[in-house]
Image (cartoon, rainbow, N blue to C red):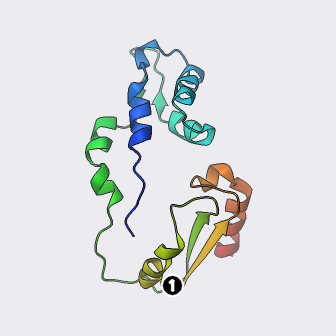
Amino acid sequence: VAYGHSQMPLIEAMRALDLSALASRREADRALAERAVEPEVRAFLLQSLELRAEGRPRWAFDLDRLAEGMARILSFPQVTGRFENPALFLAGGASDYVRAEHEPGIRSLFPATEVVRLPGAGHWLHAEAPEAFEAEVRRFLA
């Protein structure tokens, strides 16, 4: 299933930061908040902001390269094989990233899959519902 959401707004928000003017992650957090980036997403992104004693801060990944490759990142290759063993797909109940219409495609590749939706969670399950996320993963692996 091709990924239907572009991450370009996040890349643009990160590109817009004046890294040379930043002295702390807190300042970067405030600047991203002004661009309407959600708190959980900011926390995730800011883990990749390298604040160095010498030189200006920088992102640990190449934003221009990510932007150039976004169409390829969002696409999904044609796959002919199947994974026959049990698989777990976790999705946020408040997210539209994994929709009901995606399930036939998922099941065609993972016939023994279990799709679990975590109520109230969005796309960032591990950050928005960490306890429920962990409980489902542990249950599946047990």
Write down the residue under mark 1.
85
Given residues 17 and 99, the one toward you in this image is: 99
Number of numbered callouts drawn = 1
Locate the C terminus by quadrant.
bottom right
Residue 9 lies, in percent from the top left, at 42, 40
Task: Indicate whether 98 appears above or below 125.
Answer: below
Task: Indicate whether 52 appears above or below 97.
Answer: above
On the question of residue 50 being in view, the answer is: yes
The residue that appears at 62% across and 53% down in the rendered structure is 126
The residue that appears at 37% across and 37% down in the rendered structure is 61
Residue 123 lies, in percent from the top left, at 56, 55
Task: Indicate whether 1 appears above or below 114.
Answer: above
**Within 10 Å of the Cα at label 1, are there few (<14), some (14-19), or many (20+) other Cα atoms?**
few
Of the residues shown, which amino acid type is indicated by label 1? Asn
Q: Secondary structure at mark 1?
A: loop
On the question of residue 62 being in view, the answer is: no
Residue 112 lies, in percent from the top left, at 53, 85
Residue 119 placement, left or right of 74: right
The residue that appears at 39% across and 34% down in the rendered structure is 12
Given residues 19 and 13, the one toward you in this image is: 13
Residue 90 lies, in percent from the top left, at 59, 67
